[in-house]
Amino acid sequence: MTIRVYLAGPFTAIATSDSGIIDADSPWRHILEDTERALGDRGWHVFLPHRDVSAWGLRKAPPEQIATECLEAVLDSDCVVAVLGESFGTHVEVGTAIGRNIPTIVIDAAEEAGSFFGKAVTASGLVTSIRLDHLGELPATVASERFDQAVQRAGVLSRCSSGPLGGGSAADLASSAGH
């Protein structure tokens, strides 16, 4: 069984140039790529929107197209692993996952600025949280027993064995929200 994971995290605030590109030598890009490899080593299929939708900022597409593609990928995932920070987009992705009962593991890094929503959702019990001192610990953490325990607490494996709970498209999501 392959688990489909949506790996969410800040983009715009992390982009390393005024042009909105996350350069190949960006520490954040290396963390995301290393985390993807660690999840891939588990046999998981990783959707990384930074690469798969935005091409690290090189793709020029209207915001509504980017948002729709990202939300479609969230809805097609078995779980979401998210670094919230102060990223509005990541907050929307996590909210979508919660609303559709998609297990969500939030990475709370002490070095990153937090948000009111991030603190609230982490404390609410709607997500499973892992606290790190530094984001650089993320790749090793997803390869660890600590992550295995978070996967169990979040109910990822039971969700995968019983099939998707939420389903629906981003268009269905928008229409159900009255848009």
Image (cartoon, helix red, strand yellow):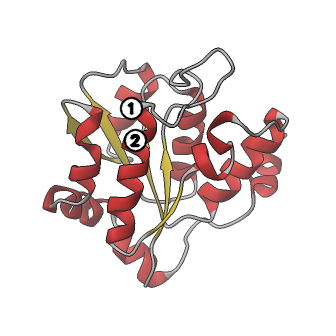
Tell which of 108 and 140 is nearer to you: 140
On screen, 152 above or below 83? Answer: below
Which label number is shown at residue 17? none
Quadrant housing the N terminus? bottom left
Q: Report which residue position mark 1 lands on.
A: 27
Left or right: 54 in relation to 136: right
Left or right: 34 in relation to 7: left
Cα–Cα span, label 1 and label 2: 5 Å
> Residue 102, how many percent across, how many down?
49, 60
Residue drawn at x 59%, y 25% as measured from the top left: 12
> Residue 116, how many percent across, how many down?
42, 20
Extreme-top residue of the structure: 18
- Residue 125, picture quadrant: top left
Disc 1 crowd rating (10 Å Cα; few below 14, some 14-19, many 20+) is: some
On screen, 66 above or below 38? Answer: above
Residue drawn at x 45%, y 73% as measured from the top left: 3
Dot 1: element: helix
Residue type, label 2: His
Confirm whether residue 92 shows in the render. yes
Disc 2 crowd rating (10 Å Cα; few below 14, some 14-19, many 20+) is: some
Residue type, label 1: Pro
Tell which of 112 and 78 is nearer to you: 112
- Residue 22, picture quadrant: top right
Q: Report which residue position mark 2 lands on.
A: 30
> Residue 50, how many percent across, how many down?
59, 43
Does the CB distance between marks 1 and 2 fall below 8 Å? Answer: yes
Tell which of 129 and 62 is nearer to you: 62
